[in-house]
Image (cartoon, rainbow, N blue to C red):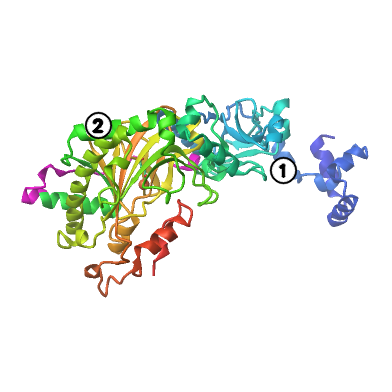
Amino acid sequence: MSMAEDSQAELAMDYDRSKDIKAFDDTKAGVKGLVDAGIVEIPRMFIRSPHELAEELIQGKSTLQVPVIELSGLEVEDARKKILDEIREASEKWGFFQSWKEYYCLIEQREELNARRIQLYQSKTAISILYRPRNVIKDKCWHVITIRMPITRANSWYAKYQILVSLPLSFKIEWQLKVKLAMDYDPSDEKKAIDDAKAGVKGLVDSGIVEIPRIFIRPPHELAEELNMCKSTLQVPVVDLSGIHVEDGRKKIVDEIREASEKWGLFQLINHGIPSSVLEGMIDGNRKFHEQDVEVKKEYYSSDPTARKVRYDSNLHVFKTKGLTANWKDTLYISELVSGYIEPEEIPEVCRKTSLEYINHVVKLEDILLGLLSEALGLKTNHLKATECDKKQLMVCHYYPACPQPELTLGTEKHTDPVFLTIVLQDQSGGLQVMCDNQWADVTPIEHGLVVNIGDLLQIVSNDKFVSAIHRVVAKKVGPRISVVCFFNGVSTPPKLYGPIKELISEENPPLYKDFPLVDYVTKFFSKPLDKTGLDLFRL
Ligand SMILES: O=C(O)CCC(=O)C(=O)O
Ligand SMILES: [Fe+2]
């Protein structure tokens, strides 16, 4: 009798399945218990139906190769495109693929447990991928899948970490990176060490670190989410101000600014009138400040924003904004420069002249922009200026050192600016990105160009006609990247109420926000995580 006939005969007998299942359950020893008991025939409850068994016998074995896709290089544009093409092809044809990637896991380094440090470990061989091996059917044939599961002795203790790749017919990659984060990690130790050194993130790089401290590592869910995100191919709008004094030219500019402010909340500016020597001088002054002797720079180090008007620090905001990652950059803050509360001598000497020159030009440009933005909202040219929305100025000089593990951190985390308007001068390194249609688009540097950002407060006073730009800066292997950001904000004292502009309100366009004093906004903004929008704080 063949195997099929055997099974047929057995299956034909009178049989009470529930009784079998109960007896099996009662043993509580599982299938292994049956084997341990020495059975030579498997119980009937495990036998597949005759037609399934018969089908199996006539089914051939495919010789096709299940696609294997190496995911390393996802961060690089060309490599990413190739990987996505392979994934698309595999998903369309198979709905399945094997993949592997040089990956990162947070692991406890045994030797360092005493020091209670968590290190990030990266290695092709030192990764444990727990993957339920199974077969895949294609063209009615079963394919056996072999899984690369490089687990070495050295890292077997962290076999709990899992990377699951599931690909349900669409070509969306779903990575679930489950990493066990140590319960007893205290970011204050790392923060204190960096603060005490007063040498900034640059100091870490200069000391030759090859792994970034844990305080800078983004949480696993964010790292995994990042892998899922596609890069936008949309072009960030560029507005050319050269035709501003011609009637038709101005109208065109106002239209372009309106469109960009409604869709992106961000645009690049060219022919804005600030001499290129001033822009280059500003970038250079910024670089000189951060690259000067640490002993001199130290004098300015303070992580307390209220301590002084001119200070520099690393962006270790993990306390205020619990759960967030520190940013891979150092920043020199120069506040209230124009409003007269600060003496020029307070600005560090290496960048004093260049900063004063730049700010002098940038405030004039700000006036022009406020006029254009007012017109874009259908208001009189001087409307926004009259609200004193640019009265308070803060200039920040960012320095983003090269990062040994850029994919694990960010130069500036995702955020919107809690101000009316921001003007950004960036060098040619790139890294600034803006969110549009839920995708990150590069704000590719234009030589001698500037970037204009709509802040939360302009979105509010425009009653959501304009949007504030969600943006960030990615970290890079090469550096430094240098940028100078000028924030323009309204007045806090005497308290002045801000809210949707009355001229923009009508029955069809009711106010979306209540009026509020600026100081309330700022306090509330900084007591929430930075990556959460401040727009909802006063939304009706
Ligand atoms: O460095 C940049 O280009 C932008 C930084 C930024 O977004 C900020 O300081 O708010
Ligand atoms: Fe910003």
- The local secondary structure at tag 1 comes to helix
Q: Residue furthest left?
A: 246
- The local secondary structure at tag 2 comes to helix
Q: Is residue 427 visible?
A: no
Classify the position of the C terminus by image quarter: bottom left
Residue 220 against residue 74 in the figure, above or below: below
Does the residue at mark 2 contact the one at mark 1 (Cβ under 8 Å)? no
Q: How many marks?
A: 2
Residue 191 magenta: no
Residue annotated with mark 1: 52
The image shows residue 287 at horizontal and vertical percentages of 34, 31
Query: Who is closer to the viewer here, 257 or 429?
Result: 429
> Residue at position x 17%, y 63% from top?
379
> Residue at position x 28%, y 70% from top?
509
Magenta region: which residues? 226-249
Left or right of residue 422, residue 153 in this image:
right
The image shows residue 66 at horizontal and vertical percentages of 58, 30
Q: Is mark 1 within 8 Å of ligand 1?
A: no
Q: Amino acid at mark 2?
A: Glu
- CA distance separating discs 2 and 1: 75 Å
Q: Is residue 534 visible?
A: yes
- Quarter of the image for residue 229 reads top left
> Residue at position x 76%, y 46% from top?
49
Residue annotated with mark 2: 280
